[in-house]
Amino acid sequence: MKSTIDQLAQRLGAELGAAAVVTEPSVLASHVVDGMQPALVCSPATAEQIAAALRVCVETEAAVVPWGRGKAMGVGETSIILVGAAISNAVFDATGIKLREIPYTPEKVKAAFATRT
């Protein structure tokens, strides 16, 4: 089921709290990577919130890109590596599958589910 950005923001806001979801263009402009600006940014505070956000994104077929809090994505930047690992572990906790390459898209999650034994 694909959903609009507003629907996704509402669902994530219900799971994480409205303050954890940003859709303001002026804020999103600072999160551009490879020339692409995200439709929204959410900031889960706990592993449980990360798992909840990922469940919502899988259900709505929204792509996920992990970010370091307030940092640019840089090669070898420790916070980026840890965030990606934390999200991968949250996906594993929520679904039982281990993703090892970002971005974690619905297609990758569905493919991992299909090959799970």
Image (cartoon, rainbow, N blue to C red):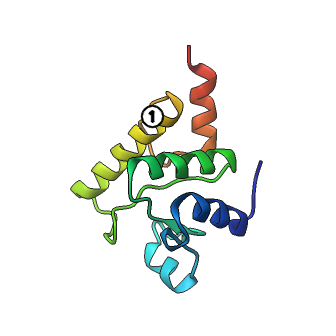
Task: Classify 33 as above or below 15.
Answer: below
Give the left or right position of residue 89, taking residue 36 as reference: left
At x 33% / y 72%, what residue is drawn?
70
The percent coordinates of residue 4 (x first, y second) are 74, 64
Neighbourhood count class around disc 1 (C-alpha, 10 Å): few under 14, some 14–19, many 20 upward? some
The percent coordinates of residue 82 (x first, y second) are 28, 49
**Residue annotated with mark 1:** 93
Considering depth in this image, is 94 or 1 the residue closer to the camera? 94
At x 45% / y 33%, what residue is drawn?
92
Give the image quarter of residue 77.
bottom left
Give the image quarter of residue 111.
top right
Image quarter where the C terminus lies is top right
Q: Is residue 105 in view from this perspective?
A: yes
At x 52% / y 86%, what residue is drawn?
26
The percent coordinates of residue 80 (x first, y second) are 31, 56
**Total marks in image:** 1
The percent coordinates of residue 2 (x first, y second) are 76, 53
Amino acid carrying mark 1 in the image: Asp
Task: Classify 51 as above or below 40.
Answer: above
At x 45% / y 31%, what residue is drawn?
98
